[in-house]
Image (cartoon, rainbow, N blue to C red):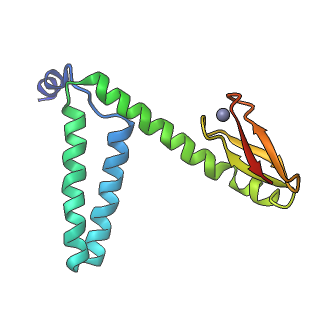
Amino acid sequence: MRTRLANFMIGRNGSDNLSRFVSVVVGIMILVAAIVGGSVSSMLWIFIVAGLAYCYFRIFSRDYNKRREENMRYLQFKSEFLSYFHGAKERFSQRRDYKFFRCPSCRAMLRVPRGKGKIKVVCRKCGASFVKKT
Ligand SMILES: [Zn+2]
């Protein structure tokens, strides 16, 4: 049975970060659906089934490159999302003296002193510049 499954999975994408994430979300939705019940839960089941279908589609997909690209996009989004929360506490404590912007071209977080009027902000990561009021 184990070798059969292994043979079946040859050339297929298998489980990756994105499908693991989707399966966790599906698991949470199943729990919520079980707790709340009623019409909310029947609506949730649509998403649960769709999420599971998507998960299995990705795991058994033979288009490895495309799935890997999706996984990379997911990982990048995740790290951006986490970094946003990571610096949030520090930004909050500095909010009196500094203003924070996201670079429009590379999404890096930029810090500029407050009360300088309209200034040109130059991104230290990618060099793009934009005008902002501080
Ligand atoms: Zn930038």
- Quadrant including the N terminus: top left
Task: State the residue at coordinates (22%, 49%).
Answer: 52
Please, is residue 91 above or below residue 74 in the view? below
Task: State the residue at coordinates (18%, 55%).
Answer: 49
Q: Position of residue 127 (x, y in %)?
A: 71, 28
Q: Position of residue 74 (x, y in %)?
A: 42, 39
User: For residue 88, what is the image quadrant?
Assistant: bottom right
Q: Nearer the viewer, residue 27 or 39?
A: 39
Task: State the residue at coordinates (35%, 27%).
Answer: 68
Task: State the residue at coordinates (31%, 22%).
Answer: 65
Left or right for 130, reference 66: right
Left or right for 1, reference 51: left
Q: Position of residue 63 (x, y in %)?
A: 23, 24
User: For residue 111, what is the image quadrant?
Assistant: top right
Left or right for 64, reference 81: left
Please, is residue 104 above or below residue 118 in the view? above
Looking at the rendered structure, the number of numbered marks drawn on it comes to 0
Please, is residue 89 above or below residue 38 in the view? above
- Quadrant including the C terminus: bottom right
Q: Which quadrant does ligand 1 occupy?
A: top right
